[in-house]
């Protein structure tokens, strides 16, 4: 829901001044989308619920089950020459997510409850990016299979970039599946790396957000 708001914000920016005007629908889209991160508990509350309750459900079995589901998709594509690079990136991100969840558990056991609580929202966003990358990789695998079938039916060699480009221009299904692969690659290569930065920040154990004096906010 936060990313949806930012997508609308970017759309307004693309339009420039026109996007800010009510003659175009984007400013209303932006306002409409904002409610998604507020109702049924703001995203900050949802993050606290994720870290404080859901990660530990059934002694963490549900979360580890999700990790297993993601790793199964990674394993399916690690030997695919066209997707193994992306699969490797997703695998690393999944491992980072699992590692941070364990870090939270150990912090709580040591009585450092403020570490998982103050980093609940960054973890929520981290998990969202990892899950999105997992699903995009899964879609890319299916799309590759469909695109290969279309190429075979049309007598096009997928390794021939010029021929493939021509097929994509003429065939809507080929264009759709090619777009799925491109979207997965973009997200995994350009957005997913943010997971590493978030993990580094969380593990720094910085609690300056809690240590600042109330009086300092007025300065």
Image (cartoon, helix red, strand yellow):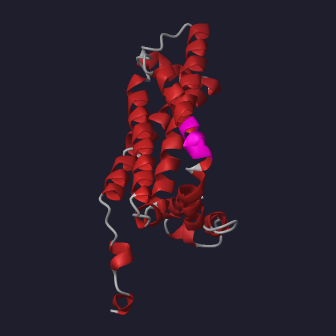
Q: Residue furthest front?
A: 110
* Residue 18 locus on image (x, y percent): 55, 68
In the image, taking residue 117 as reference, residue 142 lies left or right, namely right
Q: Which residue lies at the image location 35% right of the left edge and 47% below the top edge?
A: 196
Residue 180 visible in the snapshot = no
Q: Which residue lies at the image location 55% right of the left edge and 44% below the top edge?
A: 60
Nearer to me, 107 or 39: 107
* Residue 67 locus on image (x, y percent): 52, 36
On-image quarter of the N terminus: bottom right
Q: Is residue 200 magenta?
A: no
In the image, taking residue 190 as reference, residue 149 lies left or right, namely right
Residue 65 visible in the snapshot = yes
* Residue 189 locus on image (x, y percent): 38, 39
Q: Which residue lies at the image location 60% right of the left edge and 30% below the top edge?
A: 176
* Residue 194 locus on image (x, y percent): 38, 50
Nearer to me, 206 or 27: 206
On-image quarter of the C terminus: bottom left
Q: Which residue lies at the image location 59% right of the left edge and 10% below the top edge?
A: 154
Q: From which residue to which does the magenta span run?
A: 58-65
Nearer to me, 191 or 207: 207
Q: Is residue 64 magenta?
A: yes
Q: Is residue 48 above or below residue 90?
A: below
Q: Residue furthest right?
A: 40
Q: Is residue 76 above or below residue 46?
A: above
Name the dominant secondary structure of the magenta segment.
helix
Q: How many marks?
A: 0
């Amino acid at each position: 829901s936060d990313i949806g708001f930012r997508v609308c914000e970017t759309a307004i920016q693309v339009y420039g001044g026109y996007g800010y005007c009510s003659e175009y629908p984007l400013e209303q889209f932006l306002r409409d989308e904002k409610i998604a991160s507020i109702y049924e508990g703001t995203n900050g509350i949802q993050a606290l619920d994720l870290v404080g309750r859901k990660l530990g459900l059934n002694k963490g079995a549900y979360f580890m089950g999700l990790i297993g589901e993601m790793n199964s998709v990674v394993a399916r594509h690690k030997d695919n020459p066209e997707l193994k690079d992306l699969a490797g990136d997703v695998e690393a991100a999944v491992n980072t997510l699992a590692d941070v969840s364990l870090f939270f558990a150990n912090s709580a056991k040591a009585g450092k409850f403020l570490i998982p609580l103050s980093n609940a929202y960054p973890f929520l966003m981290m998990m969202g990016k990892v899950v999105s990358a997992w699903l995009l990789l899964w879609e890319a695998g299916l799309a590759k299979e469909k695109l290969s079938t279309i190429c075979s039916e049309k007598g096009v060699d997928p390794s021939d970039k010029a021929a493939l480009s021509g097929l994509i221009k003429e065939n809507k299904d080929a264009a759709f599946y090619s777009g799925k692969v491109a979207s997965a690659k973009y997200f995994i290569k350009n957005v997913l790396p943010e997971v590493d930065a978030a993990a580094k920040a969380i593990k720094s154990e910085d609690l300056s957000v809690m240590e600042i004096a109330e009086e300092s906010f007025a300065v």
